[in-house]
Amino acid sequence: MGIKVTKFGGSSLADANQIRKVQNILASDPTRRYMVPSAPGKRFKDDDKITDLLYKCHDIATTGKKIDSVFEQIRTRYLQIAEQLGVTLDVSAELDTIYERISAGEKKDYAASRGEYLNGKIIASALGWDFVDAAEVIRFNQKGIFDAELTNQLMADELAKHEYAIIPGFYGSRPDGTIKTFSRGGSDITGSIVARAVGAELYENWTDVSGFMVVDPRIVDDPKTIHTITYRELRELSYMGATVLHEDAIFPVSSCGIPINIRNTNIPEAEGTMIVSKVKESRNLSNVTGIAGKKNFTVIHLEKDMMNVERGFGRKVLTVLEENNISFEHLPTGIDNMSLVVSDKELDGKADKVIADIKARVTPDIVELQTGMALIAVVGRAMVHSFGTAGKVFSALGDAGINVRMIDQGSSELNIIVGVDNDCFEKAINVIYNAFFN
Ligand code: ASP
């Protein structure tokens, strides 16, 4: 029988009550053999995540002050969870060690990783499963770059010894034994690494939503859920701001075709969203899978007569960006003009220098900054085969009186990207959603 790897997010493990739901989910399917926990997350809107409190403790310790008042919140939460679950583990002793080491100046990543570490230990104790410390099986090199192959080997060898095990998310170690974490939300990556190492038939990622929505529910009321999405579509949508799964969590499983199922711990009967490598296309597919977007981009617009015959013009302009350590998002061009779309964050504090450098390098007739643009990506694998998708996007925007400032269709034909004024962002997303899904 195939193996399922599960990962539970912070809200699924925020207190004993949530952890009991997780216990039931695991107990209902014996093929769910390896589980990756996050640290306890928020129990209610203004609650603190344990990881945030641990970072706070580290910051306080570096100023030489006592961490007691913040650490007390961490202690209380874990002790309450452990007591309510009736675990036999000596949680106080574990907390004392963490307290001592953070107070003694342990590094930031060590502090942050203890959220997952201790949660993993408590859950392992509650379930009677083995605990496998991620520091032993997830490896980074000394520079902090993740070592996928060594990790895969160590993880596979170790998990072969355990029928049921908990592997805490978010961290691993360097060759010298120091702890290194992934970026925030990185337990998703750990789950994916475990799934690859054990050759899982499915990686279940349990969270507090019933899958991916077609569009951000903060922008569109009660949007539809995506039933099936490909890794590539998901990558396009995550890049454009759709969150739920860590961006890097796709790679370990996509390379070996293990599907990811996003599920809701609070509504376990909901099917959630399946993320797969390929989908058998059916005739009646809606040709759009999802819509996502981000605000705050600037267009660096250049014009120069006869630009099209000047060899190396584009390269020189891009070199200016590279030298200023700026990456660009899009590069729409005309015969005698060229636009570079750059996020405001990238350009922050560098705009004057970039303009001066471009003037010096390619002497354009015009170079100007057009600010306040939002980008919206309309993503769908079936777009390649269907007519009229772009037409529908632009009619919807035109009918709503929204001016399109930029258009870019990726050569993969997986997406259509439009630029609109920041002010029109929400309205534009709503009208595009309605055009395809209502
Ligand atoms: N606890 C970590 C965070 O809050 C990692 C995770 O939950 O995936 O970012």
Image: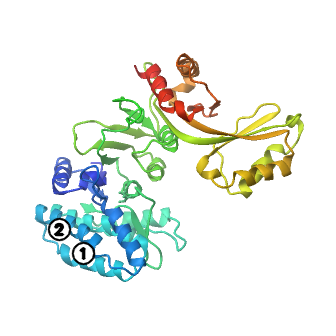
Q: Position of residue 410 (x, y in %)?
A: 62, 34
Q: Position of residue 27 (x, y in %)?
A: 17, 51
Q: Is residue 125 left or right of residue 300?
A: left
The alpha-carbon separation of the residues under discs 1 and 2 comes to 9 Å
**What is the crowding at mark 2: few (fewer than 14 residues within 10 Å), some, or many (at least 20)?**
some
* Above or below: residue 126 compared with residue 407: below
The residue that disc 1 covers is 95
Q: Quadrant of the C terminus?
A: top left
Q: Nearer the viewer, residue 66 or 103?
A: 66
Q: Are marks 1 and 2 in contact (CB under 8 Å)?
A: yes
Q: Nearer the viewer, residue 342 or 66?
A: 66
Give the mark nearer the N terminus: 1 vs 2: 2
The quadrant of the rendered image in which ligand 1 is seen is bottom left
Task: Specify whether residue 386 is in view.
Answer: no
> At x 67% / y 53%, what residue is drawn?
326
Task: Specify whether residue 31 is in view.
Answer: yes
> At x 24% / y 76%, what residue is drawn?
94
**What is the crowding at mark 1: few (fewer than 14 residues within 10 Å), some, or many (at least 20)?**
some
Q: Position of residue 69 (x, y in %)?
A: 27, 72
* Above or below: residue 258 compared with residue 304: below
Report how many numbered discs are placed on residues in the image: 2
Task: Give the residue type that dot 1 points to.
Answer: Leu
The residue that disc 2 covers is 79
Q: Secondary structure at mark 2?
A: helix
Q: Nearer the viewer, residue 6 or 240?
A: 240
> At x 80% / y 49%, what residue is drawn?
358
